[in-house]
Image (cartoon, helix red, strand yellow):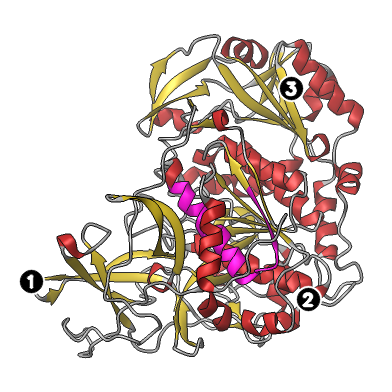
Amino acid sequence: MLIPSTLRSRVTAVVALGAAVVSVLGATPAQASRPGRHLLTGSKPRWIGQAKDAGTPASADTVHFGLLLTMRDQAGAEARLAALSDPDGASYGKYLTGAQFTAAYAPAAADVKSVTSWLTSQGLQVRDTLAGGLYVEAAGTVAQIDKTFGTTVRQYTYEGKTVKANSTDLSLPSDAPAVVTGLVNAVVGIDQGSLLKKPADTLPPPADGFRPGTPCSSYYGEKLATTLPAAPDGKKKPYVVCGYTPKQYQSAYGVTDQLKRGLDGRGVTVAVTDAYASPTIVQDLATYSRKYGLPALKPGQFRQITPPADGYNSVEECDASGWYGEETLDIEAVHTMAPGAKIVYVGAPDCFAGIDEAWAQTIDDHVADIVTNSWGSGTDDVELLGAETVKFYQLFSLKAALTGITVDFSSGDAGDQTSGGTDLPSKSVSFPSDLPFVTAVGGTSVGIDKSGNRVWEHGWQNAYQTLTDGKWGPSAYTSGGGGGTSILFEQPFYQRGKVPGSISEYFSATPHRATPDISMPGDPNTGFRVGQTQTFPDGVYYDEYRIGGTSLASPLLAGLQAIADQKAHHPLGFVNPLYYRELGTSALNDITAPRTPLYEARTNFVNGIDAGDGRAYILRQVDVQTTTIHSTPGYDAETGVGVPGEKFFSAVPGRW
């Protein structure tokens, strides 16, 4: 259940910005544009032209922001990564330590000190520094921001919310030290975009409970919908599963065999980043593990990094209790696929800027070997994301890759974003999953039989027909794994010669980054059975439901990666080059569309809990070919290189 974006449209002018954004970390943005100031070109939010001015905020209001400093030798860093992540290269796996990254690519400590001292001299507060000094977290009042950055912070009503933003381009004063004007690459956070933050003393109760409708099947094909009309092919169809259990996913994706060999992810740490923190996660995971035969967590196997209880913001706007379900899904999925791995949950104070900084801190502190992230923007439109945000994510994803951290991002749940209830007028992929140095995880639909075998697997692109007056209604696209071509980033080295030109060259003659890279189950109809404490009419207690989305695919893959790390006796780090090397081999199952239409019947409880208010019935078609992304032989923009196959764990390189 990837967090949906409220971003509205793609601006065609972004096409002209694509190449510039690709190299944006190496830019020199501080330029003298008018006497007495050093302009930070392009820092005026483009979205305010679509917003309504809501007046001047209180001058004493606090604004949290950060200075992104210029990285030394970005081109050299990317070339070095290509060598370190090449499974066939002599330098493979010789990733950098944090200190080595800082020494090679971060500003000199004395220069960072000059920046922080300058901020302090302006009356601003320095909160922290990340990435060896490449990012300086700071805060100040509106009045201080206006004076320091030569702008006027205004309030705007945008997407139904009132937010702050700078009304003009930001600039640095003429008397700022040369080292400051030379180092400051971007200012992140003054432009709040769609942010709306307010303090919250407590988190809300667990979300309202829901259960999968019955009848449903324990495995694919168990129960036929004999009382419902036949599908368009004239045949009765099986009911969807109630939610696959840990043992079923373990069996279908080769984990059962690895567990017999003592490979369960032990010695590997997986971080899950989300917003907020479920107050019942420990007891829920214990109950779930006990019920489904997973090992109980050992002391020290699970820990959480979260703000204090009074440090949460935007609780209502972010639907904090909804994030409880996201956290529970992610952690139970990782523990299912890698029951011996350590898990660190990193909970951000909100789903806006707070989650950006929590994600970056996870990388900067090297909290884990693998970081799974089941959230995103729903678009890669720099006009709405902001170039500063793109730069921020570029920097930290590059640091993660160079320091041997595997970073997974869900690719999205709306296909190419052009149908199924989205409001984007043209194709888009989800940022940050299209960053060149993260693994974009797409989604599949899978049928697992009574014996735990995959009897079919196709790309996840659903169309539903509802039962009305005893007949199936018209078919309509509903959801599917995200994929396509990034408008922001040129094609990375590992996709050259692997991705068809019809995909990578969609936006321009220059090949661009394609997503996803690899896939795992994401279809909610073939989804995961999750156990969580929820609120029901008769009380608050543990219960279970079926759920999917690429939010499921990413942590499932992270669990497999943990076992692969253990088997290799070292973190595999940036794994994309390895996946593309194995394209077409038995390490991966190539996913193609069904040869004939494939249907299943689904039952929903009208009230979401039981049959008290009746049932609704749906006929769903698997992997419909109505969007612009399809499963084809080889790489495709629906499932990437495919899904882990029979020899997936055998393909990982051994000890360095």
Position of residue 230 relative to residue 445, above or below, is below
Q: Main secondary structure of the magenta part?
A: helix
- Part of the protein shown in magenta: 322-345
Q: Is residue 65 visible?
A: yes
Determine the secondary structure under disc 3.
strand
Position of residue 555 relative to residue 243, above or below, is above
Q: Amino acid at mark 1?
A: Asp
Residue under pointer 3: 126
325 magenta-colored: yes
Q: Between disc 3 and disc 2, whose residue precedes?
A: 3
Tell me the tag on residue 567.
2
- Quadrant location of the N terminus in the rendered image: bottom left
Task: Compute the Cα span from label 2 to label 1.
Answer: 56 Å
172 magenta-colored: no
Where is residue 539 shown, x and y percent of the image?
33, 49
Determine the secondary structure under disc 1.
loop
Residue under pointer 1: 469
